[in-house]
Image (spheres, coloured by chain):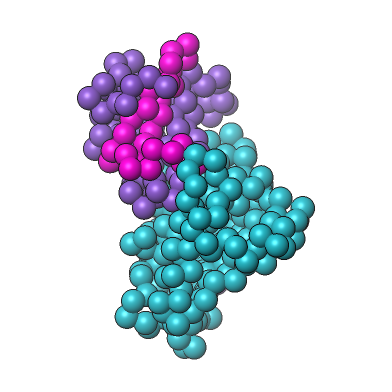
């Protein structure tokens, strides 16, 4: 019988030695990974995995990732919407793990929208 | 869907859309009895009795963006392909439970797949929702309850991507251990 033990959790706590008391600041960037049936079938889970790894490597405290349902553009899934504070949301299409990393590094962190992958402004 | 874990992700997301704040996921590999059972239960708003029988019709969907919803029809097809079935139990105002069965060794039975990735996707993308996961292989099992994790680590930790990364690795290791103990 295995359960996630207190020891496992303490290990996780130690490995993430960041000071999380400051982490819950106001989110400046919201990244929505569309997780409808179409998105999941097209690989949205792997996109989410890549995003999580990239987010774990940055020190930024003001990023938020959410799942949402399909927005109707099923044939271009996986879709990811990136919304920087005070800017219009950009919808990225046909995403995969590699494109997600690029969008994260260039758009989320540096503010440069990757228009090659984008549908256009919503 | 290439993996059953992707179906689980899909159905769990339905429950969250229905307003649930707690999702139970049960993966029961009864290898001795040659039966795989997957159950996903939510405490969302439930489904009216008249509608329950229509849900596996691909042209019945609650979403407004398209007129087709394939999640449940595909899951039912996957179950039936493996001599199993899909049943829906729901009580309006209380919640819904989707149970699917498969003949475990059926040649068409998709692999269960990457449950760690499915769980982390759910946990990370839906911070206000709790997840209770139970995976058994015959007499051994692995349990995960995000309410306990939140209690132990504190709620702030659950939104930390670094914690999510390590949690994913921990779940993966535990599930591999469960498999090798079987």
Q: Nearer the viewer, residue B51 or A105?
A: B51
The quarter of the image holding the N terminus of chain A is: bottom right
Above or below residue B58? Residue B139 is below
Farthest residue toward the bottom?
B33
At x 47% / y 15%, what residue is drawn?
A85
Taking the magenta stretch, the answer to whether it contains residue A43 is no
Lateral position of residue B146 relative to residue A48, left or right:
right
Q: Nearer the viewer, residue B44 or B56?
A: B56
Question: Where's residue B175, x and y in %?
Answer: 43, 65
At x 74% / y 60%, what residue is drawn?
B91
The quarter holding residue A91 reads top left
Above or below residue A41? Residue B52 is below
Lateral position of residue A39 relative to residue B138, left or right:
left
The quarter of the image holding the C terminus of chain A is: top left
Question: Where's residue A51, x and y in %?
Answer: 36, 36
Give me the chain that's cyan: B
Q: Find the magenta span and give its range.
A: A69-97
Chain A's colour is purple
Q: Nearer the viewer, residue B139 or B102?
A: B102
At x 42% / y 57%, what residue is drawn?
B6
Taking the magenta stretch, the answer to whether it contains residue A85 is yes
Above or below residue B143? Residue B162 is above
Question: Where's residue A22, x and y in %?
Answer: 55, 22
Residue B17 visible in image: yes
The quarter holding residue B151 reads top right
């Amino acid at each position: 019988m295995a359960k996630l033990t207190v020891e496992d959790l303490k290990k996780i706590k130690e490995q993430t030695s960041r000071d999380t008391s400051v982490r819950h600041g106001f989110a400046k960037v919201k990244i929505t990974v569309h997780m409808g049936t179409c998105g999941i079938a097209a690989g949205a889970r792997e996109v989410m995995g890549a995003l999580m790894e990239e987010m774990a490597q940055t020190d930024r405290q003001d990023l938020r990732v959410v799942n949402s349902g399909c927005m109707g553009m099923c044939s271009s899934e996986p879709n990811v919407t990136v919304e920087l504070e005070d800017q219009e949301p950009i919808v990225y299409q046909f995403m995969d793990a590699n494109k997600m990393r690029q969008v994260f590094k260039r758009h989320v962190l540096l503010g440069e929208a990757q228009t090659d992958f984008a549908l256009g402004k919503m | 869907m290439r993996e059953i874990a992707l179906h689980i992700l899909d159905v769990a997301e339905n429950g969250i859309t229905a307003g649930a704040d707690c999702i139970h996921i049960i993966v029961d590999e009864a290898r001795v009895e040659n039966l795989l059972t997957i159950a996903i239960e939510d405490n969302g708003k439930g489904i009216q009795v008249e509608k329950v029988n229509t849900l596996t019709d691909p042209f019945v969907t609650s979403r407004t963006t398209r007129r087709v919803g394939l999640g449940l029809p595909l899951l039912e097809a996957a179950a039936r392909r493996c001599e199993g079935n899909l049943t829906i139990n729901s009580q309006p105002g209380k919640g819904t439970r989707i149970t699917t069965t498969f003949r475990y060794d059926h040649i068409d039975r998709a692999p269960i797949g990457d449950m760690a990735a499915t769980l982390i996707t759910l946990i990370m993308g839906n911070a206000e929702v709790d997840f209770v996961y139970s995976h058994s292989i015959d007499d051994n099992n692995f349990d995960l309850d995000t309410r306990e994790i939140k209690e132990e680590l504190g709620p702030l930790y659950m939104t930390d991507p670094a914690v999510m990364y390590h949690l994913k690795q921990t779940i993966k290791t535990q599930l591999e251990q469960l498999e090798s103990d079987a």
